[in-house]
Image (cartoon, coloured by chain):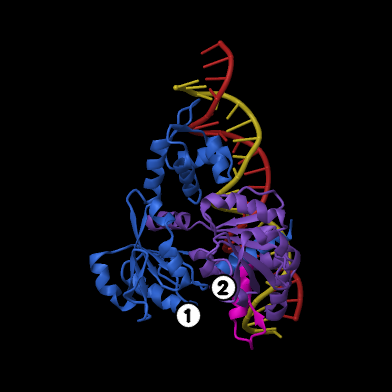
Chain colours: A purple, B blue, C red, D yellow
Amino acid sequence: MVRLPRYLRLLEDLDPSRDVVSSEELAEAAGANAANVRRDLSHIDFHGVRGIGYSVPELNVRIRQELGIADRQRVAIVGAGNLGRALANYGGLSKRGFDVIALYDTDVRKIGTKVGDVLIQDLEGLDGDCLSKSFEIAILAVPAVAAQQVAERLVEHGVHSILNFAPVRVNVPEKVSVRQVDLSMELQVLSYYGSRL
Amino acid sequence: MVRLPRYLRLLEDLDPSRDVVSSEELAEAAGANAANVRRDLSHIDFHGVRGIGYSVPELNVRIRQELGIADRQRVAIVGAGNLGRALANYGGLSKRGFDVIALYDTDVRKIGTKVGDVLIQDLEGLDGDCLSKSFEIAILAVPAVAAQQVAERLVEHGVHSILNFAPVRVNVPEKVSVRQVDLSMELQVLSYYGSRL
DNA sequence: TAGATTGTTAATCGATTAACAATC
DNA sequence: TAGATTGTTAATCGATTAACAATC
């Protein structure tokens, strides 16, 4: 559920000495309602103590478990353009348990160079690479025209979660989950809400 | 409403010779239901012709109107790090009616240089700049620690829509609308859906 | 008329939340 | 016991959608 990461964020930001947190606090951090939080947590079968609150470390573990990020996750980025490079450089990912282990491009001038610690590799090599260092999450940062084709290749190689920054919807089998981040659509929605204030 | 930009995207991608579109097509493009589409459009008081469909050019105009993007929108980006630069360079924005007219940073080594066509300016100059070339939308691409402070300054200068890429929620007055794009949270949600397939 | 597609009704579903008993 | 806070009920609200009459 979409609020769990927000609860997790609060837990991480909390003073390390804190060992309990209330539904009230979690609600505020997530922009939700306290009853809502209690619902959510009881729904993932996590329980607090009446009159006290929820155990911070236990909740942390439980949410990570639920999100499927108990272990560090390996991520590949496809497309070493401006956006792909920015994402590869973004330190926040590692802090949150995601390791960018590969950056793919088709431009021979880029292949072999590095972005931060990450080597840019030939997209053609995807097949072989998958044998050694596999990843289940990929970030698509390629031009719109290439997105569908690349998505299909990724899926072929066992990727089952795609975060798509290309401004087109990609069609993938049902077993693959995709999230679309489209800058211009975000701005349009923002403009919509902005225009009715 | 959040689906309008998706309808708009289809209209733009449609063959220019097409002059009508059905709720069925719009639904497919937006990942929604045809009844849903008809609801949405009738809700913004836009009507089609029974047995025929909706007029493509008229719907295009109507949606833009509703989203508040009938005219081109001026956007400023704050933060000329990797992400800010990537966003400034992203051609897709202009195509969708958004002009990046300013890129702010506090790093004296960056100020005065250009990213594409956009000059990097001193954040301190925000006040004066606002007099000449004002913008109502800003994209926050600064480090988490600076986000709140910068957001407040933007709001002071009349910005009332903020797209926030910094991995913290910013607190702003009610009259300001904010959208949060948090890469690691997106990945966490993605992982959640991926892990239950 | 026959075919197509809208606009709207009515049913359904899920998400939200106030409220409060339970209980630490 | 008094105070705090959970867990859950029940009411409410809005979003979704099948279905179909309206009508081009």
Q: Which residue is mark 1?
A: B145
Q: Position of residue B194 (x, y in %)?
A: 70, 59
Q: Does A81 sit above or below residue B43?
A: below
Q: Which residue is at a point 67% across and 84% down the rendered structure image?
A: A19
**View extreme (left): residue:** B132
Q: In the picture provided, is A85 more to the left or to the right than B74?
A: right
Q: Which residue is at a point 36% across and 72% down the rendered structure image?
A: B104
Dot 2 alpha-carbon crowd within 10 angstroms: few under 14, some 14 to 19, many 20 or more: some
In this figure, what is the number of numbered marks? 2
Between B174 and B73, the residue placed more toward the observer is B73
Of marks 1 and 2, the one in the foreground: 2
Q: Does A9 sit above or below residue B92?
A: below
Q: Which residue is at a point 30% across and 73% down the rendered structure image?
A: B126
Dot 1 alpha-carbon crowd within 10 angstroms: few under 14, some 14 to 19, many 20 or more: few
Residue kind at label 1, given as amino acid type: Val
Q: Mark on residue A114?
A: 2
